């Protein structure tokens, strides 16, 4: 047969091409009823009448996906090669910045992996072809993020402490139960709760705070490898956020009965996500030696303005701002300082080296946090600096009370009184449960059956569950806290403890000839030049 | 659904050789937009609506351009997306 | 409300029941308006411990490092249990004073306002 006389087929439009390459991949099953194939779509109470009403905002087909992701990877790996070949790890501002990378690899990289698993479940369980393909792409993205983060930071791991055991630590270390429990909470929800939680509440509302000001800060501090994986990951994030907004609109348009469920999940997961990302507030304000913007300002831009615009848009469906958002706004001037104080006083139990802000940094805080810093935090830090100078640094060697939901120590202050710890509690089945906030308490009271099961590190230590095999708690001289740290993968004095005494600081100065803390000067004597 | 609100939308882009002309084209096509510059990135904010036009980008880079290429260098967006061969639009619907 | 789950009547394990603490119970302790200690402290205690022993033997090891601690007039201290004012009997045990497993015991020290009056 000859095609010579036929005119070439008209080039498909983007939308037609997309329809053929996605929607047409789905079918109505005949050997099994659709309800048996997609078994988890009904129990949460969400009603979907027509999956075909799903609008795909990014008309990205799988072939284009591979093409563009491949390009992103080539760019990223070219930069990683250059970074490694040029000893880029020594070109960052100082060794304080590297402590932030430890927090990143310990706390973030494996939640990306959990997210990968979550989106694999979505790509199996959602009955619509459009959302299934979007979820499949996101599952691949999240896996890519984990891999590229590990790969990038492996160069730092060759030179600095605290990174080598990150997967082991993620499952055991006290403060890493915060991100771990967050994602496990999400992934054990039903498919609709998971996708609202992660795609909408986390990705759309909150991840800008991680990837925009913080990664821009990484660039500013000379870390070309991290900023590159950060931005490379974030270029996927724009697609994820759009999926989040689309799924919420789709659910709201499908049935009015979905509105209260979606609102409930937005309330819950905004608060859960906000509490997890509190970690970023400390990373931004304290761990970037050169600063781009303070947390309070980033929060105003990316949550108050941007979130405000989003919720103004969703108001037409009867959706309002997430419950307790006003508490988050009240906390913006305090949260980074409250967190850093926790890490500083528990530095011996941390997997990185906290330090006290310098005079110069305190002046910056006074300027950026005029309502809170001089009144509340400067006296604290000046006192601690004085004690360090006197050679008797402040330390808290007793374990903190934890919040049952977010699992942070109860470090947050009353919304209207920054001088007083916020305590909330409830009783369930004749047992007391404690929370850092009304936000966390509401979440518990709505689903106590789920959250009684929380693995709270402090309680686990006291129950004797945080011991390496062979350790005998009845042996003479048994030290439960020292043994718990070993169990958690933290080598005392190597992974944690004060920065100026650390091997990281001493090595940094020996290897670069520059101070470990550019605001405070050298801790080591200038090395006698080998003759 | 043509009406849009004036709530801000934005696109944040990496600053690199690929995005020089892209940023220029966006600013040309969206006179109401403002450019915020940060280390390694920019954020372009506009009231209600922001459009990236394929033709404007192509005029500046001197080759054909598939709008999906902007995903390579996009850091973040705000607003609802509408994408055709010719225009990538961010807006808030009323 | 309750959890909506695939499994009917799903209920998680009560992870922190008192039986799991080897004869101890958990007590959370906080010193109001003293934020230098950045969170309340959680300790395991025998329920039979006299309240007086908690004050004399345990609290100094938790909060003794604070310069206000030595100035505390213990007779003037205001105690709270689960947020409500209460008058402990120092001779009686924690349990007899109604401090159950996972109780929150707070104390207020009027007149002591922390480092340079900053409530730290």
Image (spheres, rainbow, N blue to C red):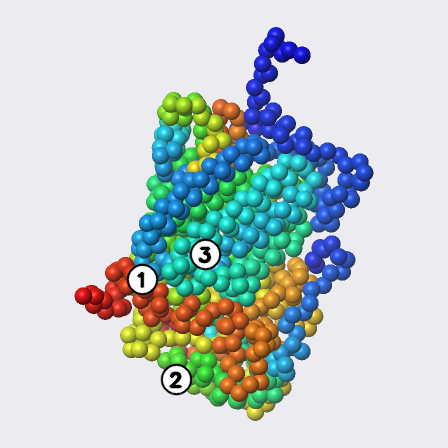
Asked whether residue A355 appears in the rendered view, the answer is no
Q: Nearer the viewer, mark 2 or mark 1?
A: 1
Residue at image point 73% right, 44% down: A38
In the displayed structure, does residue A127 sit left or right of residue A385?
right
Give the mark toward the camera: 3 or 1. 1
Do the residues under discs 2 and 3 have CB atoms within 8 angstroms? Answer: no
Percent position of residue C16, x then y? 63, 72
Q: Position of residue A395 (x, y in %)?
A: 40, 75
Say above or below: A69 vs A361: above
Location of mark 1 (residue): A508
x and y, in percent, of residue B9 in the image:
46, 37
For the residues labelled 3 and 1, the Cα–Cα distance comes to 20 Å
* Label 1 Cα crowd, 10 Å radius (few <14 / some 14-19 / many 20+): many
Secondary structure of the residue carrying numbered label 2: helix
Instruction: Using the image, determine if residue C113 lies above or below residue A308.
Output: below
Q: Which residue is mark 3?
A: A104
Q: Are marks 2 and 1 in one subunit? A: no
Picture quarter containing residue C104?
A: bottom right
Q: Which mark is residue C71?
A: 2
| Chain of the residue under label 3 | A
Q: Numbered disc 2: what chain?
A: C
Q: Label 2 to label 3, Cα distance in Å?
A: 42 Å
């Amino acid at each position: 047969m000859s095609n010579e006389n036929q005119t070439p087929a008209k080039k498909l439009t983007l939308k037609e091409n997309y329809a053929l390459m996605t929607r047409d991949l789905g079918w109505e099953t005949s050997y099994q009823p659709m309800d048996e194939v997609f078994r988890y779509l009904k129990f949460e109470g969400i009603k979907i009448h027509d999956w075909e009403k799903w609008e795909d905002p990014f008309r990205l087909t799988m072939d284009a996906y591979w093409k563009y992701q491949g390009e992103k990877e080539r760019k990223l790996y070219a930069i990683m090669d250059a970074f490694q070949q040029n000893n880029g790890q020594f070109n960052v501002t100082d060794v304080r910045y590297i402590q932030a990378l430890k927090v990143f690899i310990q706390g973030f990289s494996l939640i990306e992996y959990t997210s990968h698993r979550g989106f694999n479940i979505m790509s199996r369980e959602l009955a619509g072809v459009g959302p299934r393909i979007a979820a499949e792409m996101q599952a691949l993205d999240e896996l890519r993020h984990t891999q590229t983060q590990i790969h990038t930071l492996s160069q730092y791991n060759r030179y600095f402490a605290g990174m080598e055991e990150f997967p082991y630590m993620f499952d055991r270390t006290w403060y890493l139960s915060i991100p771990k429990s967050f994602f496990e909470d999400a992934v054990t929800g039903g498919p609709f709760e998971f996708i609202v939680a992660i795609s909408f509440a986390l990705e759309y509302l909150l991840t800008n705070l991680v990837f925009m000001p913080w990664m821009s800060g990484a660039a500013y501090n000379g870390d070309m490898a991290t900023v590159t994986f950060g931005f490379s990951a974030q270029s996927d994030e724009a697609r994820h956020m759009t999926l989040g907004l689309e799924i919420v609109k789709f659910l709201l348009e499908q049935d009015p009965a979905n509105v209260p469920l979606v609102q409930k999940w937005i309330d819950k997961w905004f608060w859960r996500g906000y509490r997890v990302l509190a970690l970023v507030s400390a990373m931004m304000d304290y761990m970037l030696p050169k600063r781009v913007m303070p947390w309070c300002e980033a929060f105003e831009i990316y949550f108050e303005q941007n979130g405000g615009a989003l919720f103004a848009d969703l108001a037409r469906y009867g959706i309002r701002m997430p419950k307790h958002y006003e508490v988050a706004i009240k906390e913006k001037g305090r949260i980074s300082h409250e967190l850093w104080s926790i890490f500083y006083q528990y530095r011996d139990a941390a997997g990185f080296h906290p330090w006290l802000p310098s005079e110069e940094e305190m002046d910056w805080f006074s300027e950026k946090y005029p309502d809170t810093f001089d009144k509340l935090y400067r006296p604290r830090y000046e006192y601690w600096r004085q004690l360090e100078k006197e050679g008797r640094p402040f330390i808290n060697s007793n374990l903190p009370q934890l919040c049952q939901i977010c699992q942070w120590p109860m470090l947050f202050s009353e919304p209207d009184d920054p001088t007083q710890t916020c305590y909330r509690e409830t009783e369930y089945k004749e047992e007391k449960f404690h929370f850092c906030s009304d936000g966390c308490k509401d979440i518990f009271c709505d689903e106590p059956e789920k959250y009684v099961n929380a693995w709270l590190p402090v309680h686990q230590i006291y129950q004797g569950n945080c011991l390496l095999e062979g350790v005998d708690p009845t042996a003479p001289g048994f030290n439960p806290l020292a043994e718990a740290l070993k169990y958690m993968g933290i080598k005392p004095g190597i992974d944690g403890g004060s920065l100026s005494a650390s091997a990281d600081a001493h090595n940094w100065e020996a290897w670069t000839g520059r101070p470990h803390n550019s605001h405070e000067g050298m801790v080591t004597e200038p090395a006698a030049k080998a003759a | 659904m043509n009406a849009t609100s004036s709530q801000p939308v934005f696109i944040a882009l990496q600053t690199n050789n690929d995005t020089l002309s892209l940023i220029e084209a966006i600013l040309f096509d969206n006179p109401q937009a403002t450019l915020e510059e940060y280390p390694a990135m920019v954020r372009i904010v506009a009231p209600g609506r922001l459009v990236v036009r394929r033709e404007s980008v192509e005029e500046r880079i001197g080759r054909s351009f598939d709008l999906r290429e902007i995903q390579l260098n996009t850091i973040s967006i705000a607003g609802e997306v509408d994408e055709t061969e010719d225009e990538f639009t961010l807006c808030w619907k009323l | 409300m309750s959890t909506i789950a695939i499994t009917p009547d799903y209920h998680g394990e009560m992870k922190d029941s008192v039986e799991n603490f080897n004869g101890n119970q958990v007590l959370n302790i906080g010193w109001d308006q003293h934020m230098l200690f950045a969170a309340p402290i959680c300790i395991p205690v025998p329920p039979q411990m006299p309240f007086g022993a908690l004050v004399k033997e345990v609290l100094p090891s938790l909060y003794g490092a604070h310069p206000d601690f030595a100035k505390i007039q213990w007779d003037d201290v205001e105690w709270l249990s689960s947020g409500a004012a209460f008058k402990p009997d120092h001779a009686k045990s924690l349990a007899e004073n109604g401090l159950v497993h996972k109780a929150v015991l707070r104390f207020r020290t009027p007149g002591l306002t922390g480092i340079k009056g900053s409530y730290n």
